[in-house]
Image (spheres, grey):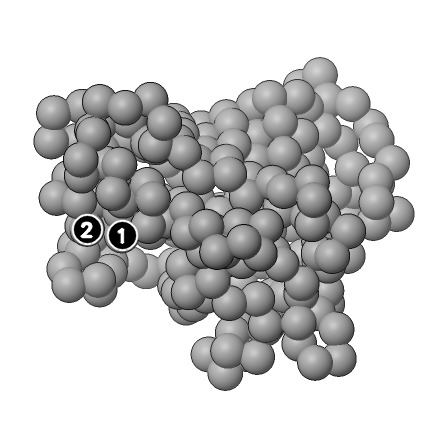
Amino acid sequence: MYEKKYRELLKEVMTGFSVERNDRTGVGCISQFALGINIDVDKYFPILTGKKMYPMIFESEFEWFISGHTNVKELQEKGNTIWNEWADKAGDLGPVYGHQLRNFNSQGYDQLKSVLNSLKNDPDSRRHIISLWNPNQLHEMALPPCYLYFQFFVDGNNLNMFALQRSADLFLGVPYDMALFTKIMLYVGDRVGLKPKNLDVKFIDAHIYKNHYDAVNTYLNEPYMAPIEYTYEKGILTLKNYKPGKIIKAPVAI
């Protein structure tokens, strides 16, 4: 069960052998190295029920990502403000996630198109890879990508995906990242005729910010529901009987 595994991850960092670290934001955090979550997304969608999540956020971010766009204005039009703090006055973030996906290094190379073609035409390949980390353009980005690598593995009619995050804000960021990754799997699977099955995510720097401790403890004391079933038809995700818990706020570390 995804939410149980997610809570175990939070508890591990809160009570395990974490390292106290200074960080770019100045807030400070506790971190552990190379933690992960492996889940089956065949039937259930990884969305939390112990605290309120907003599907609009990961849905709009997904559409923004695969479009190749990098301006926050279209996110804002859908009520998504999560990237506002990093955008310039015109709303631009530089050649971040979507740009590297659809126009790698500003040289016209479309990684999404390439991986769809390879999955269709050479399913046993070990090169179904999308890499968003581009050292040549890091200096142009408002924020370097946190999720930076995807690799797909075909097993019969099943599509499996590995995702790598260099940096993982466990309380605020990871729940939406997990939903976004699943949306990517659903999108890709739909276009190549494969059924999404196993999602394996590794967090190299898995951290909880110091000003998130109270929110994490509040969440861990909240009850949660059974896994949420879903359907995905014609590009539309429908969550069945999703009844999220209460809003648990925590400040964004910028």
> How far from the left and from the top, in percent, is residue 220?
54, 40
Mark 2 Cα-neighbour bin, 10 Å: few <14, some 14–19, many ≥20? some
- The residue positioned 82% from the left and 28% from the top of the image is 20
Task: Please tell me the numbered disc located at residue 23.
Answer: none
Mark whose residue sits in front, 2 or 1: 2
Picture layout, residue 58 above or below residue 137: below
Residue 102: image quadrant is bottom left
Task: Please tell me the numbered disc located at residue 187.
Answer: 1
Count of numbered circles in the view: 2
Q: Disc 2 marks which amino acid?
A: Arg
Picture layout, residue 1 above or below residue 187: above
| Residue closest to the far top | 17
> How far from the left and from the top, in percent, is residue 203?
57, 30
Q: Assess whether mark 1 and mark 2 are in contact (beta carbons under 8 angstroms).
A: yes
Q: Along the horizontal axis of the image, is 186 left or right of 76?
A: left
Secondary structure under badge 2?
Answer: helix
Task: Please tell me the numbered disc located at residue 191.
Answer: 2
- The residue positioned 51% from the left and 74% from the top of the image is 75
Q: Disc 1 marks which amino acid?
A: Tyr
> How far from the left and from the top, in percent, is residue 98?
50, 57
Residue 225 can be seen, yes or no: no
Residue 89 can be seen, yes or no: yes
Q: Which of these two is toward me, 157 or 40? A: 157
- The residue positioned 27% from the left and 44% from the top of the image is 116
- The residue positioned 40% from the left and 38% from the top of the image is 3
Spatial separation of the CA atoms under disc 2 and disc 1: 6 Å
Mark 1 Cα-neighbour bin, 10 Å: few <14, some 14–19, many ≥20? many
Picture layout, residue 198 above or below residue 134: above
Picture layout, residue 108 above or below residue 171: below
Q: Which of these two is toward me, 246 or 145? A: 145
